[in-house]
Amino acid sequence: MKNWKMTAAGLLAVSFLTAGLACPLPAGAAAVNQKQSATTEYKEGSVIPASKTEAMRLAAKEKALSEYYITSGSKLEKAISRLESLDPGKTGLDAGKHYFYRMDKALTGNYFQHVKAFTRNLETLVGEYFIAKDNSCVFRRFPEDGSFEMLDGTTEKLLKKVEIYRASAIIPLKGKGKVLVRVPGNLPYDLTLTSLTENIATINEENGQLTISGNARGYADVLAEVEIGGYVKTEKLRFAVMDDRDISNYEARQYYPVYVGMGWGWGWGWDGPHHPGPPPPRPGGGGHGPHPGGGGGHGPRPGGGGGPRR
């Protein structure tokens, strides 16, 4: 059994603002953001006098705010109230100060509301937060090093959204296989892999990453465990360990199922006729063994709903 602690970095949201926009706010940080509207309308490719560039820049920023972010309304106020209910020592938000808040219109990872708090002039990012859409947990991200801290709640529901899947169903003999994990918001997690068929495949750690070594031809079952905030999600994944001949035959006839003989290893079906047509039935009849793309409980494959974290 091998354990690997993965620290996520990078976010889906892209910041469009770095400075400007004086934004006086009314009393109460949860109040709707109040900003001064630009008198100039931003138009793509327009030619303007140099004296109006500052006004045009302001207009472009305001347009970006309206297109990509929520800066007013009950949804934002509810999110800010959630943050205000937490310990200021953890959120970094001073109850005596006013901030400019914005929320991404799209959910991050289809699960988190992504909220940022800026100083009133939008020159300094004060805090970055991820609030679960079911309100079950709140995280803070520290942009300096990309680390996360859970501020409140439980990760039990979050773990149900985590996806665990194979990088490939086939592991070359003496080659390596991988398990991939996708977590909403790219939150950090602990990954543990355990080989349930160690005579076929074993788990190794290389350069800080867990890999699955194919040691003998046959099927390998691997138990994957992902832990976040004291809760664990498990998934049993099945791999097919193949040598060069196995892979060549499989690629040439991948519309056939892969037949497994008695015990571990591949059956004589690989040596069947090479002309079109199904291979002969297994001696004694019975069902077919699972093929590399099937069997077991495994998550989505890359390109079919799954995706790398980073």
Image (tube, grey):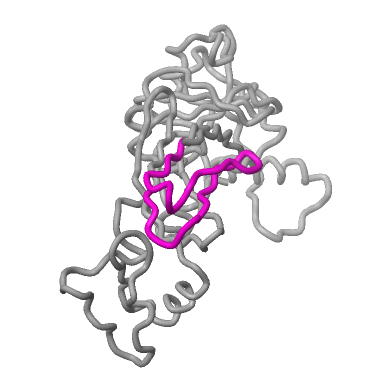
Vertical relation: 284 (above or below) 109 = below
Let me know if residue 39 appears in the view.
no
- Lateral position of residue 263 relative to residue 64, left or right: left
Q: What range is drawn magenta here? A: 192-221
Give the main secondary structure of the magenta stretch.
strand
Q: What x and y, as percent, mark residue 154?
A: 37, 22
Q: Quadrant of residue 128?
A: top right
Query: What residue is at 39 percent from the left and 38 percent from the top?
Result: 111
- Lateral position of residue 58 relative to residue 217, left or right: right
- Lateral position of residue 205 relative to residue 2, left or right: right
Query: What residue is at 77 percent from the left and 54 percent from the top?
Result: 48
Q: Does residue 279 belong to the magenta stretch?
A: no
- Lateral position of residue 281 relative to residue 156, left or right: left
Vertical relation: 108 (above or below) 22 = below
Q: Residue furthest right?
A: 50
Query: 49 or 174, which is in the foreground?
Result: 174
Query: 177 or 234, which is in the foreground?
Result: 177
Let me know if residue 96 appears in the view.
yes
Query: What residue is at 32 percent from the left and 62 percent from the top?
Result: 294
Q: Quadrant of residue 208?
A: top right
Vertical relation: 65 (above or below) 270 = above
Q: What x and y, as percent, mark residue 73?
A: 41, 31
Q: Does residue 199 belong to the magenta stretch?
A: yes
Q: What x and y, as percent, mark residue 301?
A: 42, 58
Q: What x and y, as percent, mark residue 190?
A: 49, 32
